[in-house]
Structures are given as C-alpha cells and as structure tokens.
Image (cartoon, helix red, strand yellow):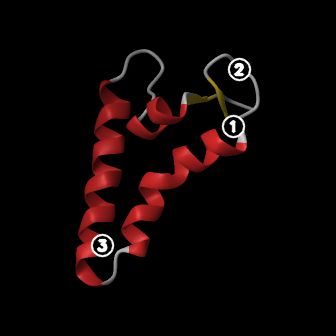
C-alpha cells in the first residue's frame, strides 16, 4: 500500500506525481515512447534497489511516498 512518508494516506497530488513516470512513456508515440518508458522504469528500479532501508524508488521520492505492507 502506498502512503505518505509519515504514514498518512496519499493526497491526490502525491498519487499523480508517483504515477507520472509510468505515464510519460505511454503518451509519447511509437518506439520512442517505449524506450523512454523502459528507461524511466529502469531508473526507478535502480534507485529503489540502492535506497536503504526503505527501498523507495525515484517516483516515491518525488511524491514523498513509501510502500508498506497492508
């Protein structure tokens, strides 16, 4: 479950910011969009793997969110 860093529910703005990198690749047409989307997802995964101990990806850092077990 995605929540704010302080544990409160995500605001609509934070939820939109958190999803933005995943949407960007889909709004750019053709193969370029697929490449951009792939690179953004790769960057998110790499930042999540490197972030200790919270494992927050770049999209979580931008949105001020984290994922918890529900």
Label tally: 3
Name the quarter where the N terminus is drawn.
Answer: top right
Q: Is residue 20 left or right of residue 8?
A: left
Say above or below: 40 vs 51.
below
The label number, if any, that marks residue 39 in the structure image = none
Contact, CB < 8 Å: mark 2 with mark 1?
no
Residue at the (38%, 32%) spot, across then down: 48
| Front residue (pair 3, 1) | 3
Give the residue pinned by disc 3.
34
- Of the numbered discs 3 and 2, the one sitting upstream in the chain is 2
Q: Is residue 61 left or right of residue 40?
A: right
Q: Is residue 69 left or right of residue 57?
A: right
| Front residue (pair 52, 59) | 59
Q: Is residue 63 left or right of residue 25?
A: right
Q: CA distance from mark 2 to mark 1?
A: 10 Å
Residue at the (35%, 75%) spot, across then down: 28
Q: Residue 3 appears at what percent x and percent y?
A: 68, 31
- Of the numbered discs 2 and 1, the one sitting upstream in the chain is 1
- Determine the secondary structure under disc 2: loop
Name the quarter where the C terminus is drawn.
Answer: top right
The label number, if any, that marks residue 1 in the structure image = 1
Task: State which mark lies toward you, 2 or 1.
Answer: 2
Contact, CB < 8 Å: mark 3 with mark 2?
no
Can you name the residue that lies furthest to the front here? 13
Q: Residue 50 appears at what percent x and percent y?
A: 30, 25
Give the residue pinned by disc 2.
7
Q: Quadrant of residue 13?
A: top right
Say above or below: 7 vs 32.
above
- Of the numbered discs 1 and 3, the one sitting upstream in the chain is 1
């Amino acid at each position: 479950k995605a929540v704010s860093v302080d544990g409160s529910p995500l605001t609509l703005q934070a939820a939109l910011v958190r999803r933005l990198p995943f949407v960007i690749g889909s709004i750019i047409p053709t193969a370029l969009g697929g490449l951009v989307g792939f690179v953004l997802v790769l960057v998110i995964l790499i930042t999540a793997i490197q972030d200790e101990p919270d494992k927050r990806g770049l999209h979580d850092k931008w949105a001020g969110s984290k994922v918890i077990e529900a």
